[in-house]
Amino acid sequence: MTPVTRLVLAVTSVFWALPALADECDISISANDAMQFDTKELSVPASCQQVTLTLKHTGQLPAGVMGHNWVLTKTADMSAVATDGISAGADNAFIKPDDARVIAATDVIGGGASTSVTFDTSALKKGEDYSFFCSFPGHWAIMQGKLQLT
Ligand SMILES: [Cu+2]
């Protein structure tokens, strides 16, 4: 194999690998007017440097009534972050400003909208217990699930 052939093959395989990697690094979740996420478990491949989570609100109620966001913390931090988020209020999208316990969070959206957030997987450790939840007042106790780095 000539060096040029080897280079062409290497470039080609990178080109082919990109779409597959992009897909597994894009995760999604939806939420509805019944105050529910459509999944209780998300996994993030450690092979992704960054992950983009897209949240879709499949309901019809406005954000002021049935707003949803997606917030990621260590499970141990979840209830405190949610409680501080309620105090922070709608102006802060129900997250305490500069809350270092928040690994990633989307905007609060209403029915028919979608939003996304991109975060580095270097913020996550294998074996650590992470939870995601909606910090809209009254929602976190029901709207929550686990996220795992795999
Ligand atoms: Cu919600």
Image (cartoon, rainbow, N blue to C red):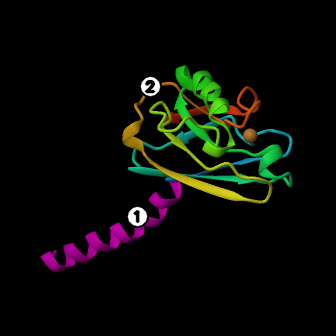
**Amino acid type at mark 1:** Ala
> For the residue labelled by badge 2, is the local secondary structure a helix, a strand or a loop?
loop
User: Residue placed at 61% from the left, 43% from the top?
Assistant: 92
Does the stretch in magenta take in 18? yes
Q: Which residue is mark 2?
A: 127
Tally of marks: 2
Task: Give the spatial CA distance, label 2 vs label 1.
Answer: 27 Å
Compare residues 39 and 107 and report the one nearer the observer: 107
> In the image, which residues are magenta?
1-24
**Amino acid type at mark 2:** Gly
User: Residue placed at 63% from the left, 56% from the top?
Assistant: 115
Q: Is residue 2 visible?
A: no
> Quarter containing ligand 1?
top right
Q: Which residue is mark 1?
A: 17
- Relative side of 48 to 87, left or right: left
User: Residue placed at 44% from the left, 25% from the top?
Assistant: 127
Q: Extreme top residue here? A: 76
Q: Main secondary structure of the magenta part?
A: helix
